[in-house]
Amino acid sequence: MIPLSDRINQLAESETLAMTRKSRELKAQGHDVINLSIGEPDFFTPNNIKDAAKKAIDENFTFYPPVNGYAEVRQAISKKLKRDNNLEYSPEQIVISTGAKHSIMNALLCLINPQDEVVIPTPYWVSYAHMVTFAQGKHVYVETSIENDFKITPQQLKKAITANTKLFMFSSPCNPSGSVYTKDELKALAEVFEKHPHVYIISDEIYELINFNKNHESIAQFESIKDRVILINGISKGFAMTGWRLGYMAAHPELAKASNKLQGQFTSAACSIAQKAAEEAMETLPQTTWHMLDKFKERRDLVLNLVKDLPGFKTNVPQGAFYIFPDISSYFGKSNGSQTINNANDFCMYILNKVHVALVPGSAFGSPNYIRLSYATSNELLIEAVDRIKSALVALK
């Protein structure tokens, strides 16, 4: 047996990727699997962005870029942040990385010392907890409720912060709940952070363009805390560019410089061609992506209507992203005679094996009574998937 490090042994496989892997295995065996476990738009990258990448190849953008990204791409991101979000970030405050996930990991490794506390509202994106563990930080989870649209309140935040708190991290629009914080809600949180200048904030805004209000609000807009906000974004969700693997951080110059140093030792720069494609994406007005947004909203409404026929499912009305996050705990303890549903993981495996629909258990997101269902697929497949789930649930008594 290879003596692997404690670091890797303590790191769990991503449960969303694990469910995707299991569904692929079933497909390889000839089963007709509907995969609702992965967070990936089913649209193609816009043609103007693909054309920019082809042009970059023809113009020989094939050499090592600067570690933090081409100056012109960081300038395009800077302009986008001003144009769309009214946020002032110089190109020197921006670091381009291999996906938003990479940007978050950079921030954690640059900020967290062993046992520093990181406050995370649940449900949270699947990798947050494991990233904090990898950085040797200590999780402090704050449980939100479906009744409060899965949003942390200022009172909960005040209670969670201690002298050892170093960081707060959240996403809006949120993966997995689809919740979107309003300006007033963010302002109320910012007022708490004002009283705790030792606390930094990772604001994961990767779903910015999948916001059904079409009006994204960032916590970085509040000047009193802006220097402590690490804004994370990218191109994968809003521009249907998951495979291009490019994200970015906008932060205080010292943190940007630290991330540049760290990245220089780990990966160096993100792909040169993906960067030039991202430059075009940043120069593209958000309105040009609204056809995708409108389709996601149509699918959300379809799925919410369909799950009304699933007894015991309880969900909020997501205002962004492309997931629903229902409470399915009413099925715990039920059985089909050969399998008993003890938790959400059992529920998801039962549905996968019984009717070949892949879902993700809420335990992956810190909320064990829930499951995540992605509606980033066709109406026909969504209708078929919910119909299959319904047929499987009938057998549970």
Image (cartoon, grey):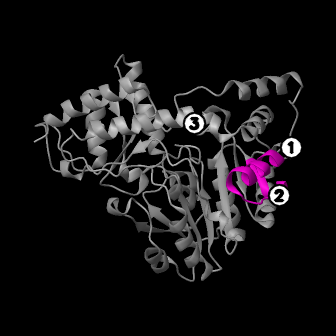
Position in image of residue 391 (x %, y %): 19, 30
Q: Residue at x 46, y 64 (%)?
A: 121
Quadrant of res 232? bottom right
Q: Amino acid at mark 1?
A: Glu
- At label 3, counting other C-alpha atoms closer than 10 Å, the crowd grade (few under 14, some 14-19, many 20 or more) is some
**Circle 3 is placed at which residue position?**
290
**Circle 1 is placed at which residue position?**
72
- Indicate left or right for 77 with 179 as reference: right
Find out whether residue 84 is within the magenta segment. yes
For the magenta stretch, what is the residue range? 74-96
Position in image of residue 321 (x %, y %): 49, 45
- At label 2, counting other C-alpha atoms closer than 10 Å, the crowd grade (few under 14, some 14-19, many 20 or more) is some
Q: Are marks 2 and 3 in contact (CB under 8 Å)?
A: no
Q: Residue at x 38, y 59 (%)?
A: 149
Which SS class for mark 2? Answer: loop
Position in image of residue 101 (x %, y %): 62, 48
Q: Amino acid at mark 2?
A: Ser
Q: Nearer the viewer, mark 2 or mark 3?
A: 3
- At label 1, counting other C-alpha atoms closer than 10 Å, the crowd grade (few under 14, some 14-19, many 20 or more) is few
Residue 109 circle label: none
Position in image of residue 147 (x %, y %): 32, 62
